[in-house]
Image (spheres, rainbow, N blue to C red):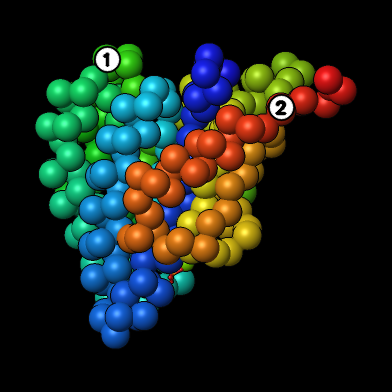
Amino acid sequence: MQKNNIPYHVAIIMDGNGRWAENKNMPRSIGHEQGLKTLSKITQKVFEVGVKNLSVYAFSSENWKRPKNEITHLMALFEKALESNFQYMVDNKIKFNLLGNIKKFPSSLQKKIRNLEEITQKNKDFNFYLAANYGSKEELAFAADTLRNSSRKITESIFKNAFYAPNLPDVDLLIRTGGETRLSNFLLWQSAYAEIYFTKTLWPDFKTTHLNKALEFFSRKIRRFGKIY
Ligand code: IPE
Ligand code: IPE
Ligand code: MG
């Protein structure tokens, strides 16, 4: 934890893009496009207030069950997002990391991800984690599989070191937009002690004022971590 009650790691489940568009009688793809605009604005604000680590849930391991045309559009949108935010990450010394299993993505997208990871890998000020084709259960199974031949006793820290991103800190504040009150397989281990903020606001409508409310919610929390003070 940092001073002034600013969370060190904020994680966001960006939900509600489809409903936002459907409410306006527009195709779901427009909702995802609008959601991307929200992501750019909110990312800037999150880092401006001093949060060092931001992880955002963009595509779950379960989202492959969606219609093919929605998936294809999302993949194209991810490529566009990487291109348009490339310079922002470089200029602001943000380290970009993909959280998830990259292998199922189109090869052009894989290349862009690896390129941005490589170019920003020495950046130290901020960390941006894009959770795409991410599933917490898959990550835990992956870690267990990686360590299966180890002769050492598996401690919490050894287990965590086998995760997709071993350096990802525990989540301090987890925000879920869109009204659902579930984790949908996002950072289950890392959120063991997260303060969880659910809001009905659909992700494309999420503004700085909403972010500030979530940060205020966090700053009011007494984090006991099992103690009694
Ligand atoms: C979240 O918005 C974005 C992704 C899962 C890709 P949804 O697409 O889930 O939007 P709703 O929940 O259907 O409104
Ligand atoms: C969670 O949203 C995943 C992302 C935001 C990427 P979903 O819309 O997929 O979650 P469920 O299906 O309602 O649990
Ligand atoms: Mg949803």
Quadrant placement of the N terminus: top right
Q: Position of residue 65 (x, y in %)?
A: 46, 71
Q: Position of residue 73 (x, y in %)?
A: 24, 67
Query: Residue at 35% of width from left, 60% of height from top?
Result: 205
Which of the marked residues, 1 or 2, is nearer the chain's N terminus? 1
Query: Which numbered marker is on residue 21?
Result: none
Badge 1 local density, few (<14 within 10 Å), some, or many (20+)? few
Q: Is residue 116 left or right of residue 38?
A: left
Alpha carbons under labels 1 and 2: distance apart: 32 Å
Q: Position of residue 95 (x, y in %)?
A: 30, 25
Q: Which residue is mark 2?
A: 223
In this rendering, the answer to whether 2 lies above or below 11 is above
Query: Residue at 65% of width from left, 26% of height from top?
Result: 159
Closer to the eye: label 1 or 2: 2
Query: Which numbered marker is on residue 122?
Result: 1
The residue at label 2 has a CB less than 8 Å from ligand 2: no
Q: Is residue 23 left or right of residue 154?
A: left
Query: Residue at 36% of width from left, 72% of height from top?
Result: 20
Nearer to us in this view, 63 or 57: 57
Name the amino acid, label 1: Lys
Name the amino acid, label 2: Arg
Q: Is residue 124 left or right of residue 183?
A: left
In this rendering, the answer to whether 200 lies above or below 123 is below
Quadrant placement of the C terminus: top right
